Amino acid sequence: MPDPPARDEDLVRRYLSGDRAAFAALVERHERRVYNLALRMTGREEDARDATQDAFLTVLRKLSSFRGEAAFTTWLHRVTVNACYDLLRTRQRAPLLDRGEDDLPAREPPPAPDHADTSSLSMDVRQALLQVPEDFRAVMILHDVHDLRQEEVAAIVGVPVGTVKSRLHRGRIALAKAMGIQQEGRPSGEPPSGSDEPPDGPGFGERADAAGPSEGTVSP
């Protein structure tokens, strides 16, 4: 019987002990996950590649600060979301739906399957998703596309679970509006009952650690 694959945390320890191949193994294992998240956040293959590279460079620089009190994937998702926020804020591009076909999301992602590849998002939905404010978009991608629990999404973006629920609700309303779907029974800007987030919400595109660093996460 072959040996079971090394855990992420074991690969981190091996790299910090001098095993350079361990970091290459981490990249190979998680590159597709990072790329998929970046592609859906940014909408373009070129930007997704840039954000993926930036995320792994940050991981390489900050790996010694990873204490293992959160899952490595939670930490990696957080770094990736921050890389996407930084790229989007720097480039300040026009919405994807206003650009030509050359700027449409890539149709051929890199090899190695990822859970998010099984998502049934149509191209129209992917384009409409880019009209959703970045902080709402991030929680929708993490929860609805990558199928992460709300508690894990909260740990990734550094906000309470109640705020994640509010952003999911408001993001879905924004997505429906972008697709021309009428919402009934609630004004589009009104958060769900019991939400801990004010109607105006936080600044769009805020870094995922804006609420303060937590264990297993990187500081800006």
Image: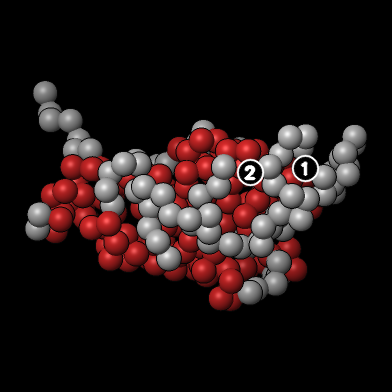
Q: Hey, which quadrant is residue 1 in on the image?
A: top left
Taking the image as shown, residue 60 lies to the left or right of residue 17, namely right
Which image quadrant: the C terminus?
A: bottom left
Give the numbered dot on residue 191: 1
Q: Which residue is drawn at 90% across and 36% down?
A: 184
How far apart in space, not on screen, are marks 1 and 2 (Cα)? 10 Å
The single residue placed furthest to the bottom in the displayed view is 91
> From the viewer's perspective, is 105 left or right of 125?
left
Q: Where is residue 85 in the image (x, y as percent from the top left)?
A: 54, 64
Question: Mark 2 or mark 1, which is nearer the start of the sequence?
Answer: 2
Q: Which mark is residue 30?
A: none
Q: Is residue 190 above or below residue 61?
A: above
In the displayed structure image, the side of residue 122 where residue 49 appears, left or right: left
Depicted 53 relative to depicted 33: above or below: below
Please name whichever residue, 25 or 92, is drawn nearer the observer in this view of the structure: 92
Q: In this view, does 164 lie above or below 200?
A: above
Q: Position of residue 50 (x, y in %)?
A: 44, 68
Residue position for label 2: 163
The amino acid on which the numbered mark 1 sits, given as a three-letter code, is: Pro
Q: Residue type at mark 2?
A: Thr
Q: In front here: 63 or 198?
A: 198
Contact, mark 1 vs mark 2 (Cβ under 8 Å):
no
- Camera-side residue of 172 and 52: 172
Q: Residue at x 58, y 68 (%)?
A: 88
Task: State the residue at coordinates (38%, 58%).
Answer: 218
Which residue is painted at 19% across and 38% down in the image?
Answer: 6
Q: Quadrant of residue 59?
A: bottom left
Query: Can residue 81 be seen in the rendering of this structure?
Result: no
Disc 2, SS = helix
